Image (cartoon, grey):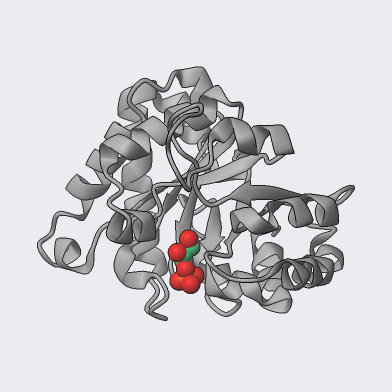
Amino acid sequence: MNKAKRQAVIAGNWKMNKTRPEAKALIEQIKPLVKDADCGVVVCVPYTNLETALEATKGSNIKVGAENCHWAKSGAFTGEISADMLAEMGVEYVVIGHSERRQYFGETDKTVNQRVRAALDAGLKVILCVGELLEQREQGITEEVCGMQTKVALCGVSKEELSHIIIAYEPVWAIGTGKTATAEQADEVNGFIRSVVAGLYGEDAAQALTIQYGGSMNAKNAEELLSKEHVDGGLIGGASLKAEDFSIIVKAASK
Ligand code: 13P
């Protein structure tokens, strides 16, 4: 099975949560619970918590990510953070194209592509988010939407660079709603995304790509979702803010 060859990665997306002392306390709680993980473990935290997270995770198996980055190297972009700034700190991952950025902050497929390019140029690993809205699923255009988002985001990304990318399929209707996609729905779209990547980069590259599922993944449903052939991990929102729940998901991915 190809799944066995791919690295499973469980990443927490803390979104706009936690002050620095709270971030430190949460990481200290998570550390012993995930130390024997047989999968990648990442915490993606607000910019203000990056230094705290890097310090707290030193010497552990937990990697640190940011939740976005700008596409320019530097310049007059008030309030923004560049990929180089993150890389210089020692940050390893960055989430790009999250649906909350697309919904609330005018993120487009084109700006997602520009940010992916900037992140790769800075040496960061990218967690690229794609996913359909509820009405798009109801119209039967989930594959068109996810296919287009994937293709545009990967414009100008080489086959070699693809190994620095994780794709996270996050159906927007499942985020923060408690409404999870069924394991079959997640597997079906993840498999479709893999076929799109195969069309761009060939079957070998597509088979090696880690494709996560995100959207109300929790301690109870993780094992079933993660058992599916094309679900190579998870991007976890709410449940990543509870050490115990997050560690149960990491354990499920380690099987
Ligand atoms: P929830 O797990 O809270 O649904 O959030 C998922 C998500 O958006 C992760 O990026």
Task: Name the spot of residue 93 as percent of width and height, x first.
Answer: 61, 42
Q: Residue at x 53, y 52 (%)?
A: 67
Q: The C terminus lies in which quarter of the figure?
A: bottom right
Q: In the image, is 141 to the left or to the right of 154?
A: left
Q: The N terminus lies in which quarter of the figure?
A: top right
Task: Name the spot of residue 230 as percent of width and height, x first.
Answer: 46, 50
Q: Is residue 124 visible?
A: yes
Q: Residue at x 80, y 72 (%)?
A: 25
Q: Residue 46 sits in which quadrant?
A: bottom right
Q: In the image, is 137 to the left or to the right of 16?
A: left
Q: Residue 117 sits in which quadrant?
A: top left
Task: Name the spot of residue 202 as percent of width and height, x first.
Answer: 39, 22
Q: Is residue 181 visible?
A: no
> Against 166, is 248 above or below?
below
Q: In the image, is 110 to the left or to the right of 254?
A: left
User: Which of the two residues, 145 or 181, is positioned nearer the viewer here?
Assistant: 145
Residue furthest out toward the right? 59
Q: In the image, is 35 to the left or to the right of 68?
A: right
Q: Residue at x 37, y 78 (%)?
A: 179
Q: Residue at x 63, y 38 (%)?
A: 86
Residue furthest out toward the left? 139
Give the total of numbered labels: 0
Task: Name the spot of residue 181 as percent of width and height, x first.
Answer: 36, 69
